Image: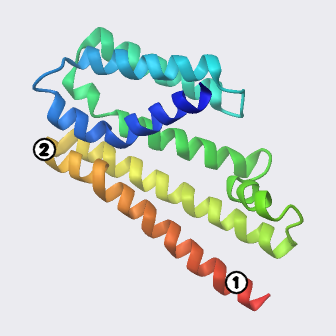
Amino acid sequence: MKRLIGAGLLIAGLLYPFAVHFGMAHYAPWQFGLLLGGLWLARALSAPRRPGSLWMAIAALVFCGLLGLSDSQALLRWYPVLISTFMLGLFGSSLVHGIPVAERLARLSDPALPPRAVRYTRQVTQAWCLFFLLNGLIAAALTLWAPLGWWTLYNGVIAYAAMGVLFALEWLIRQRVRGRS
């Protein structure tokens, strides 16, 4: 059930810009808030406690509650900014407290990372922080000043393409770094 809820949130996040763009003619903003709020509540109640998961769930539920109460089309467009803020908070806080996110992921395949790899994973986590900061700022600017079509194109296509490019670049750099070891 936990995986189904997580998959539901992932799919909702991926399709959200298109759902907003094409769904606003047929659905009220409070309905989007109700659906997202239901998914976040189910996740909060069923997911294991991880660092940051509770505050993210609470913030998302507050956002969904405000969306439901205000029934505001303008507020609908702030969800991608919220998600970028969550990701920036998650990656950024891991640089200060605990093990950086990229290091945690790297240790899944190699638990005994050498010091050089630990430094590298810290830099990768910093790069993702920069990405989520820029992504959130662009999404906010588009929310405030761009037509819905531009907002949908960026948040539904360009942001994910940029994420894919960053993944690919990091993978290529990692192969070079490994080759020098």
Residue lying at 51% horizontally and 75% vertically, measured from the top left = 169
Residue 33 lies in what quarter of the image? top left
Q: What is the CA distance from the residue labelled 2 to the residue labelled 1? A: 43 Å
Q: Image check: 127 left or right of 20?
A: right
Residue 175 drawn at (x, y percent): 65, 82
**Dot 2, crowdedness within 10 Å: few (<14), some or many (≥20)?**
few
Give the residue number, with chain letter if any, for mark 2: 147
Looking at the figure, which quarter contains the N terminus?
Answer: top right
Q: Image check: 122 left or right of 44?
A: right
- In the displayed structure, 59 sits above or below 77; it is above
For badge 1, the amino acid type reads Val
Badge 1 element:
helix
- In the displayed structure, 141 sits above or below 9; it is below
Nearest the viewer among 36 and 118 is: 36
Badge 2 element:
loop
Q: Which mark is residue 177?
A: 1
Nearest the viewer among 8 and 141 is: 8
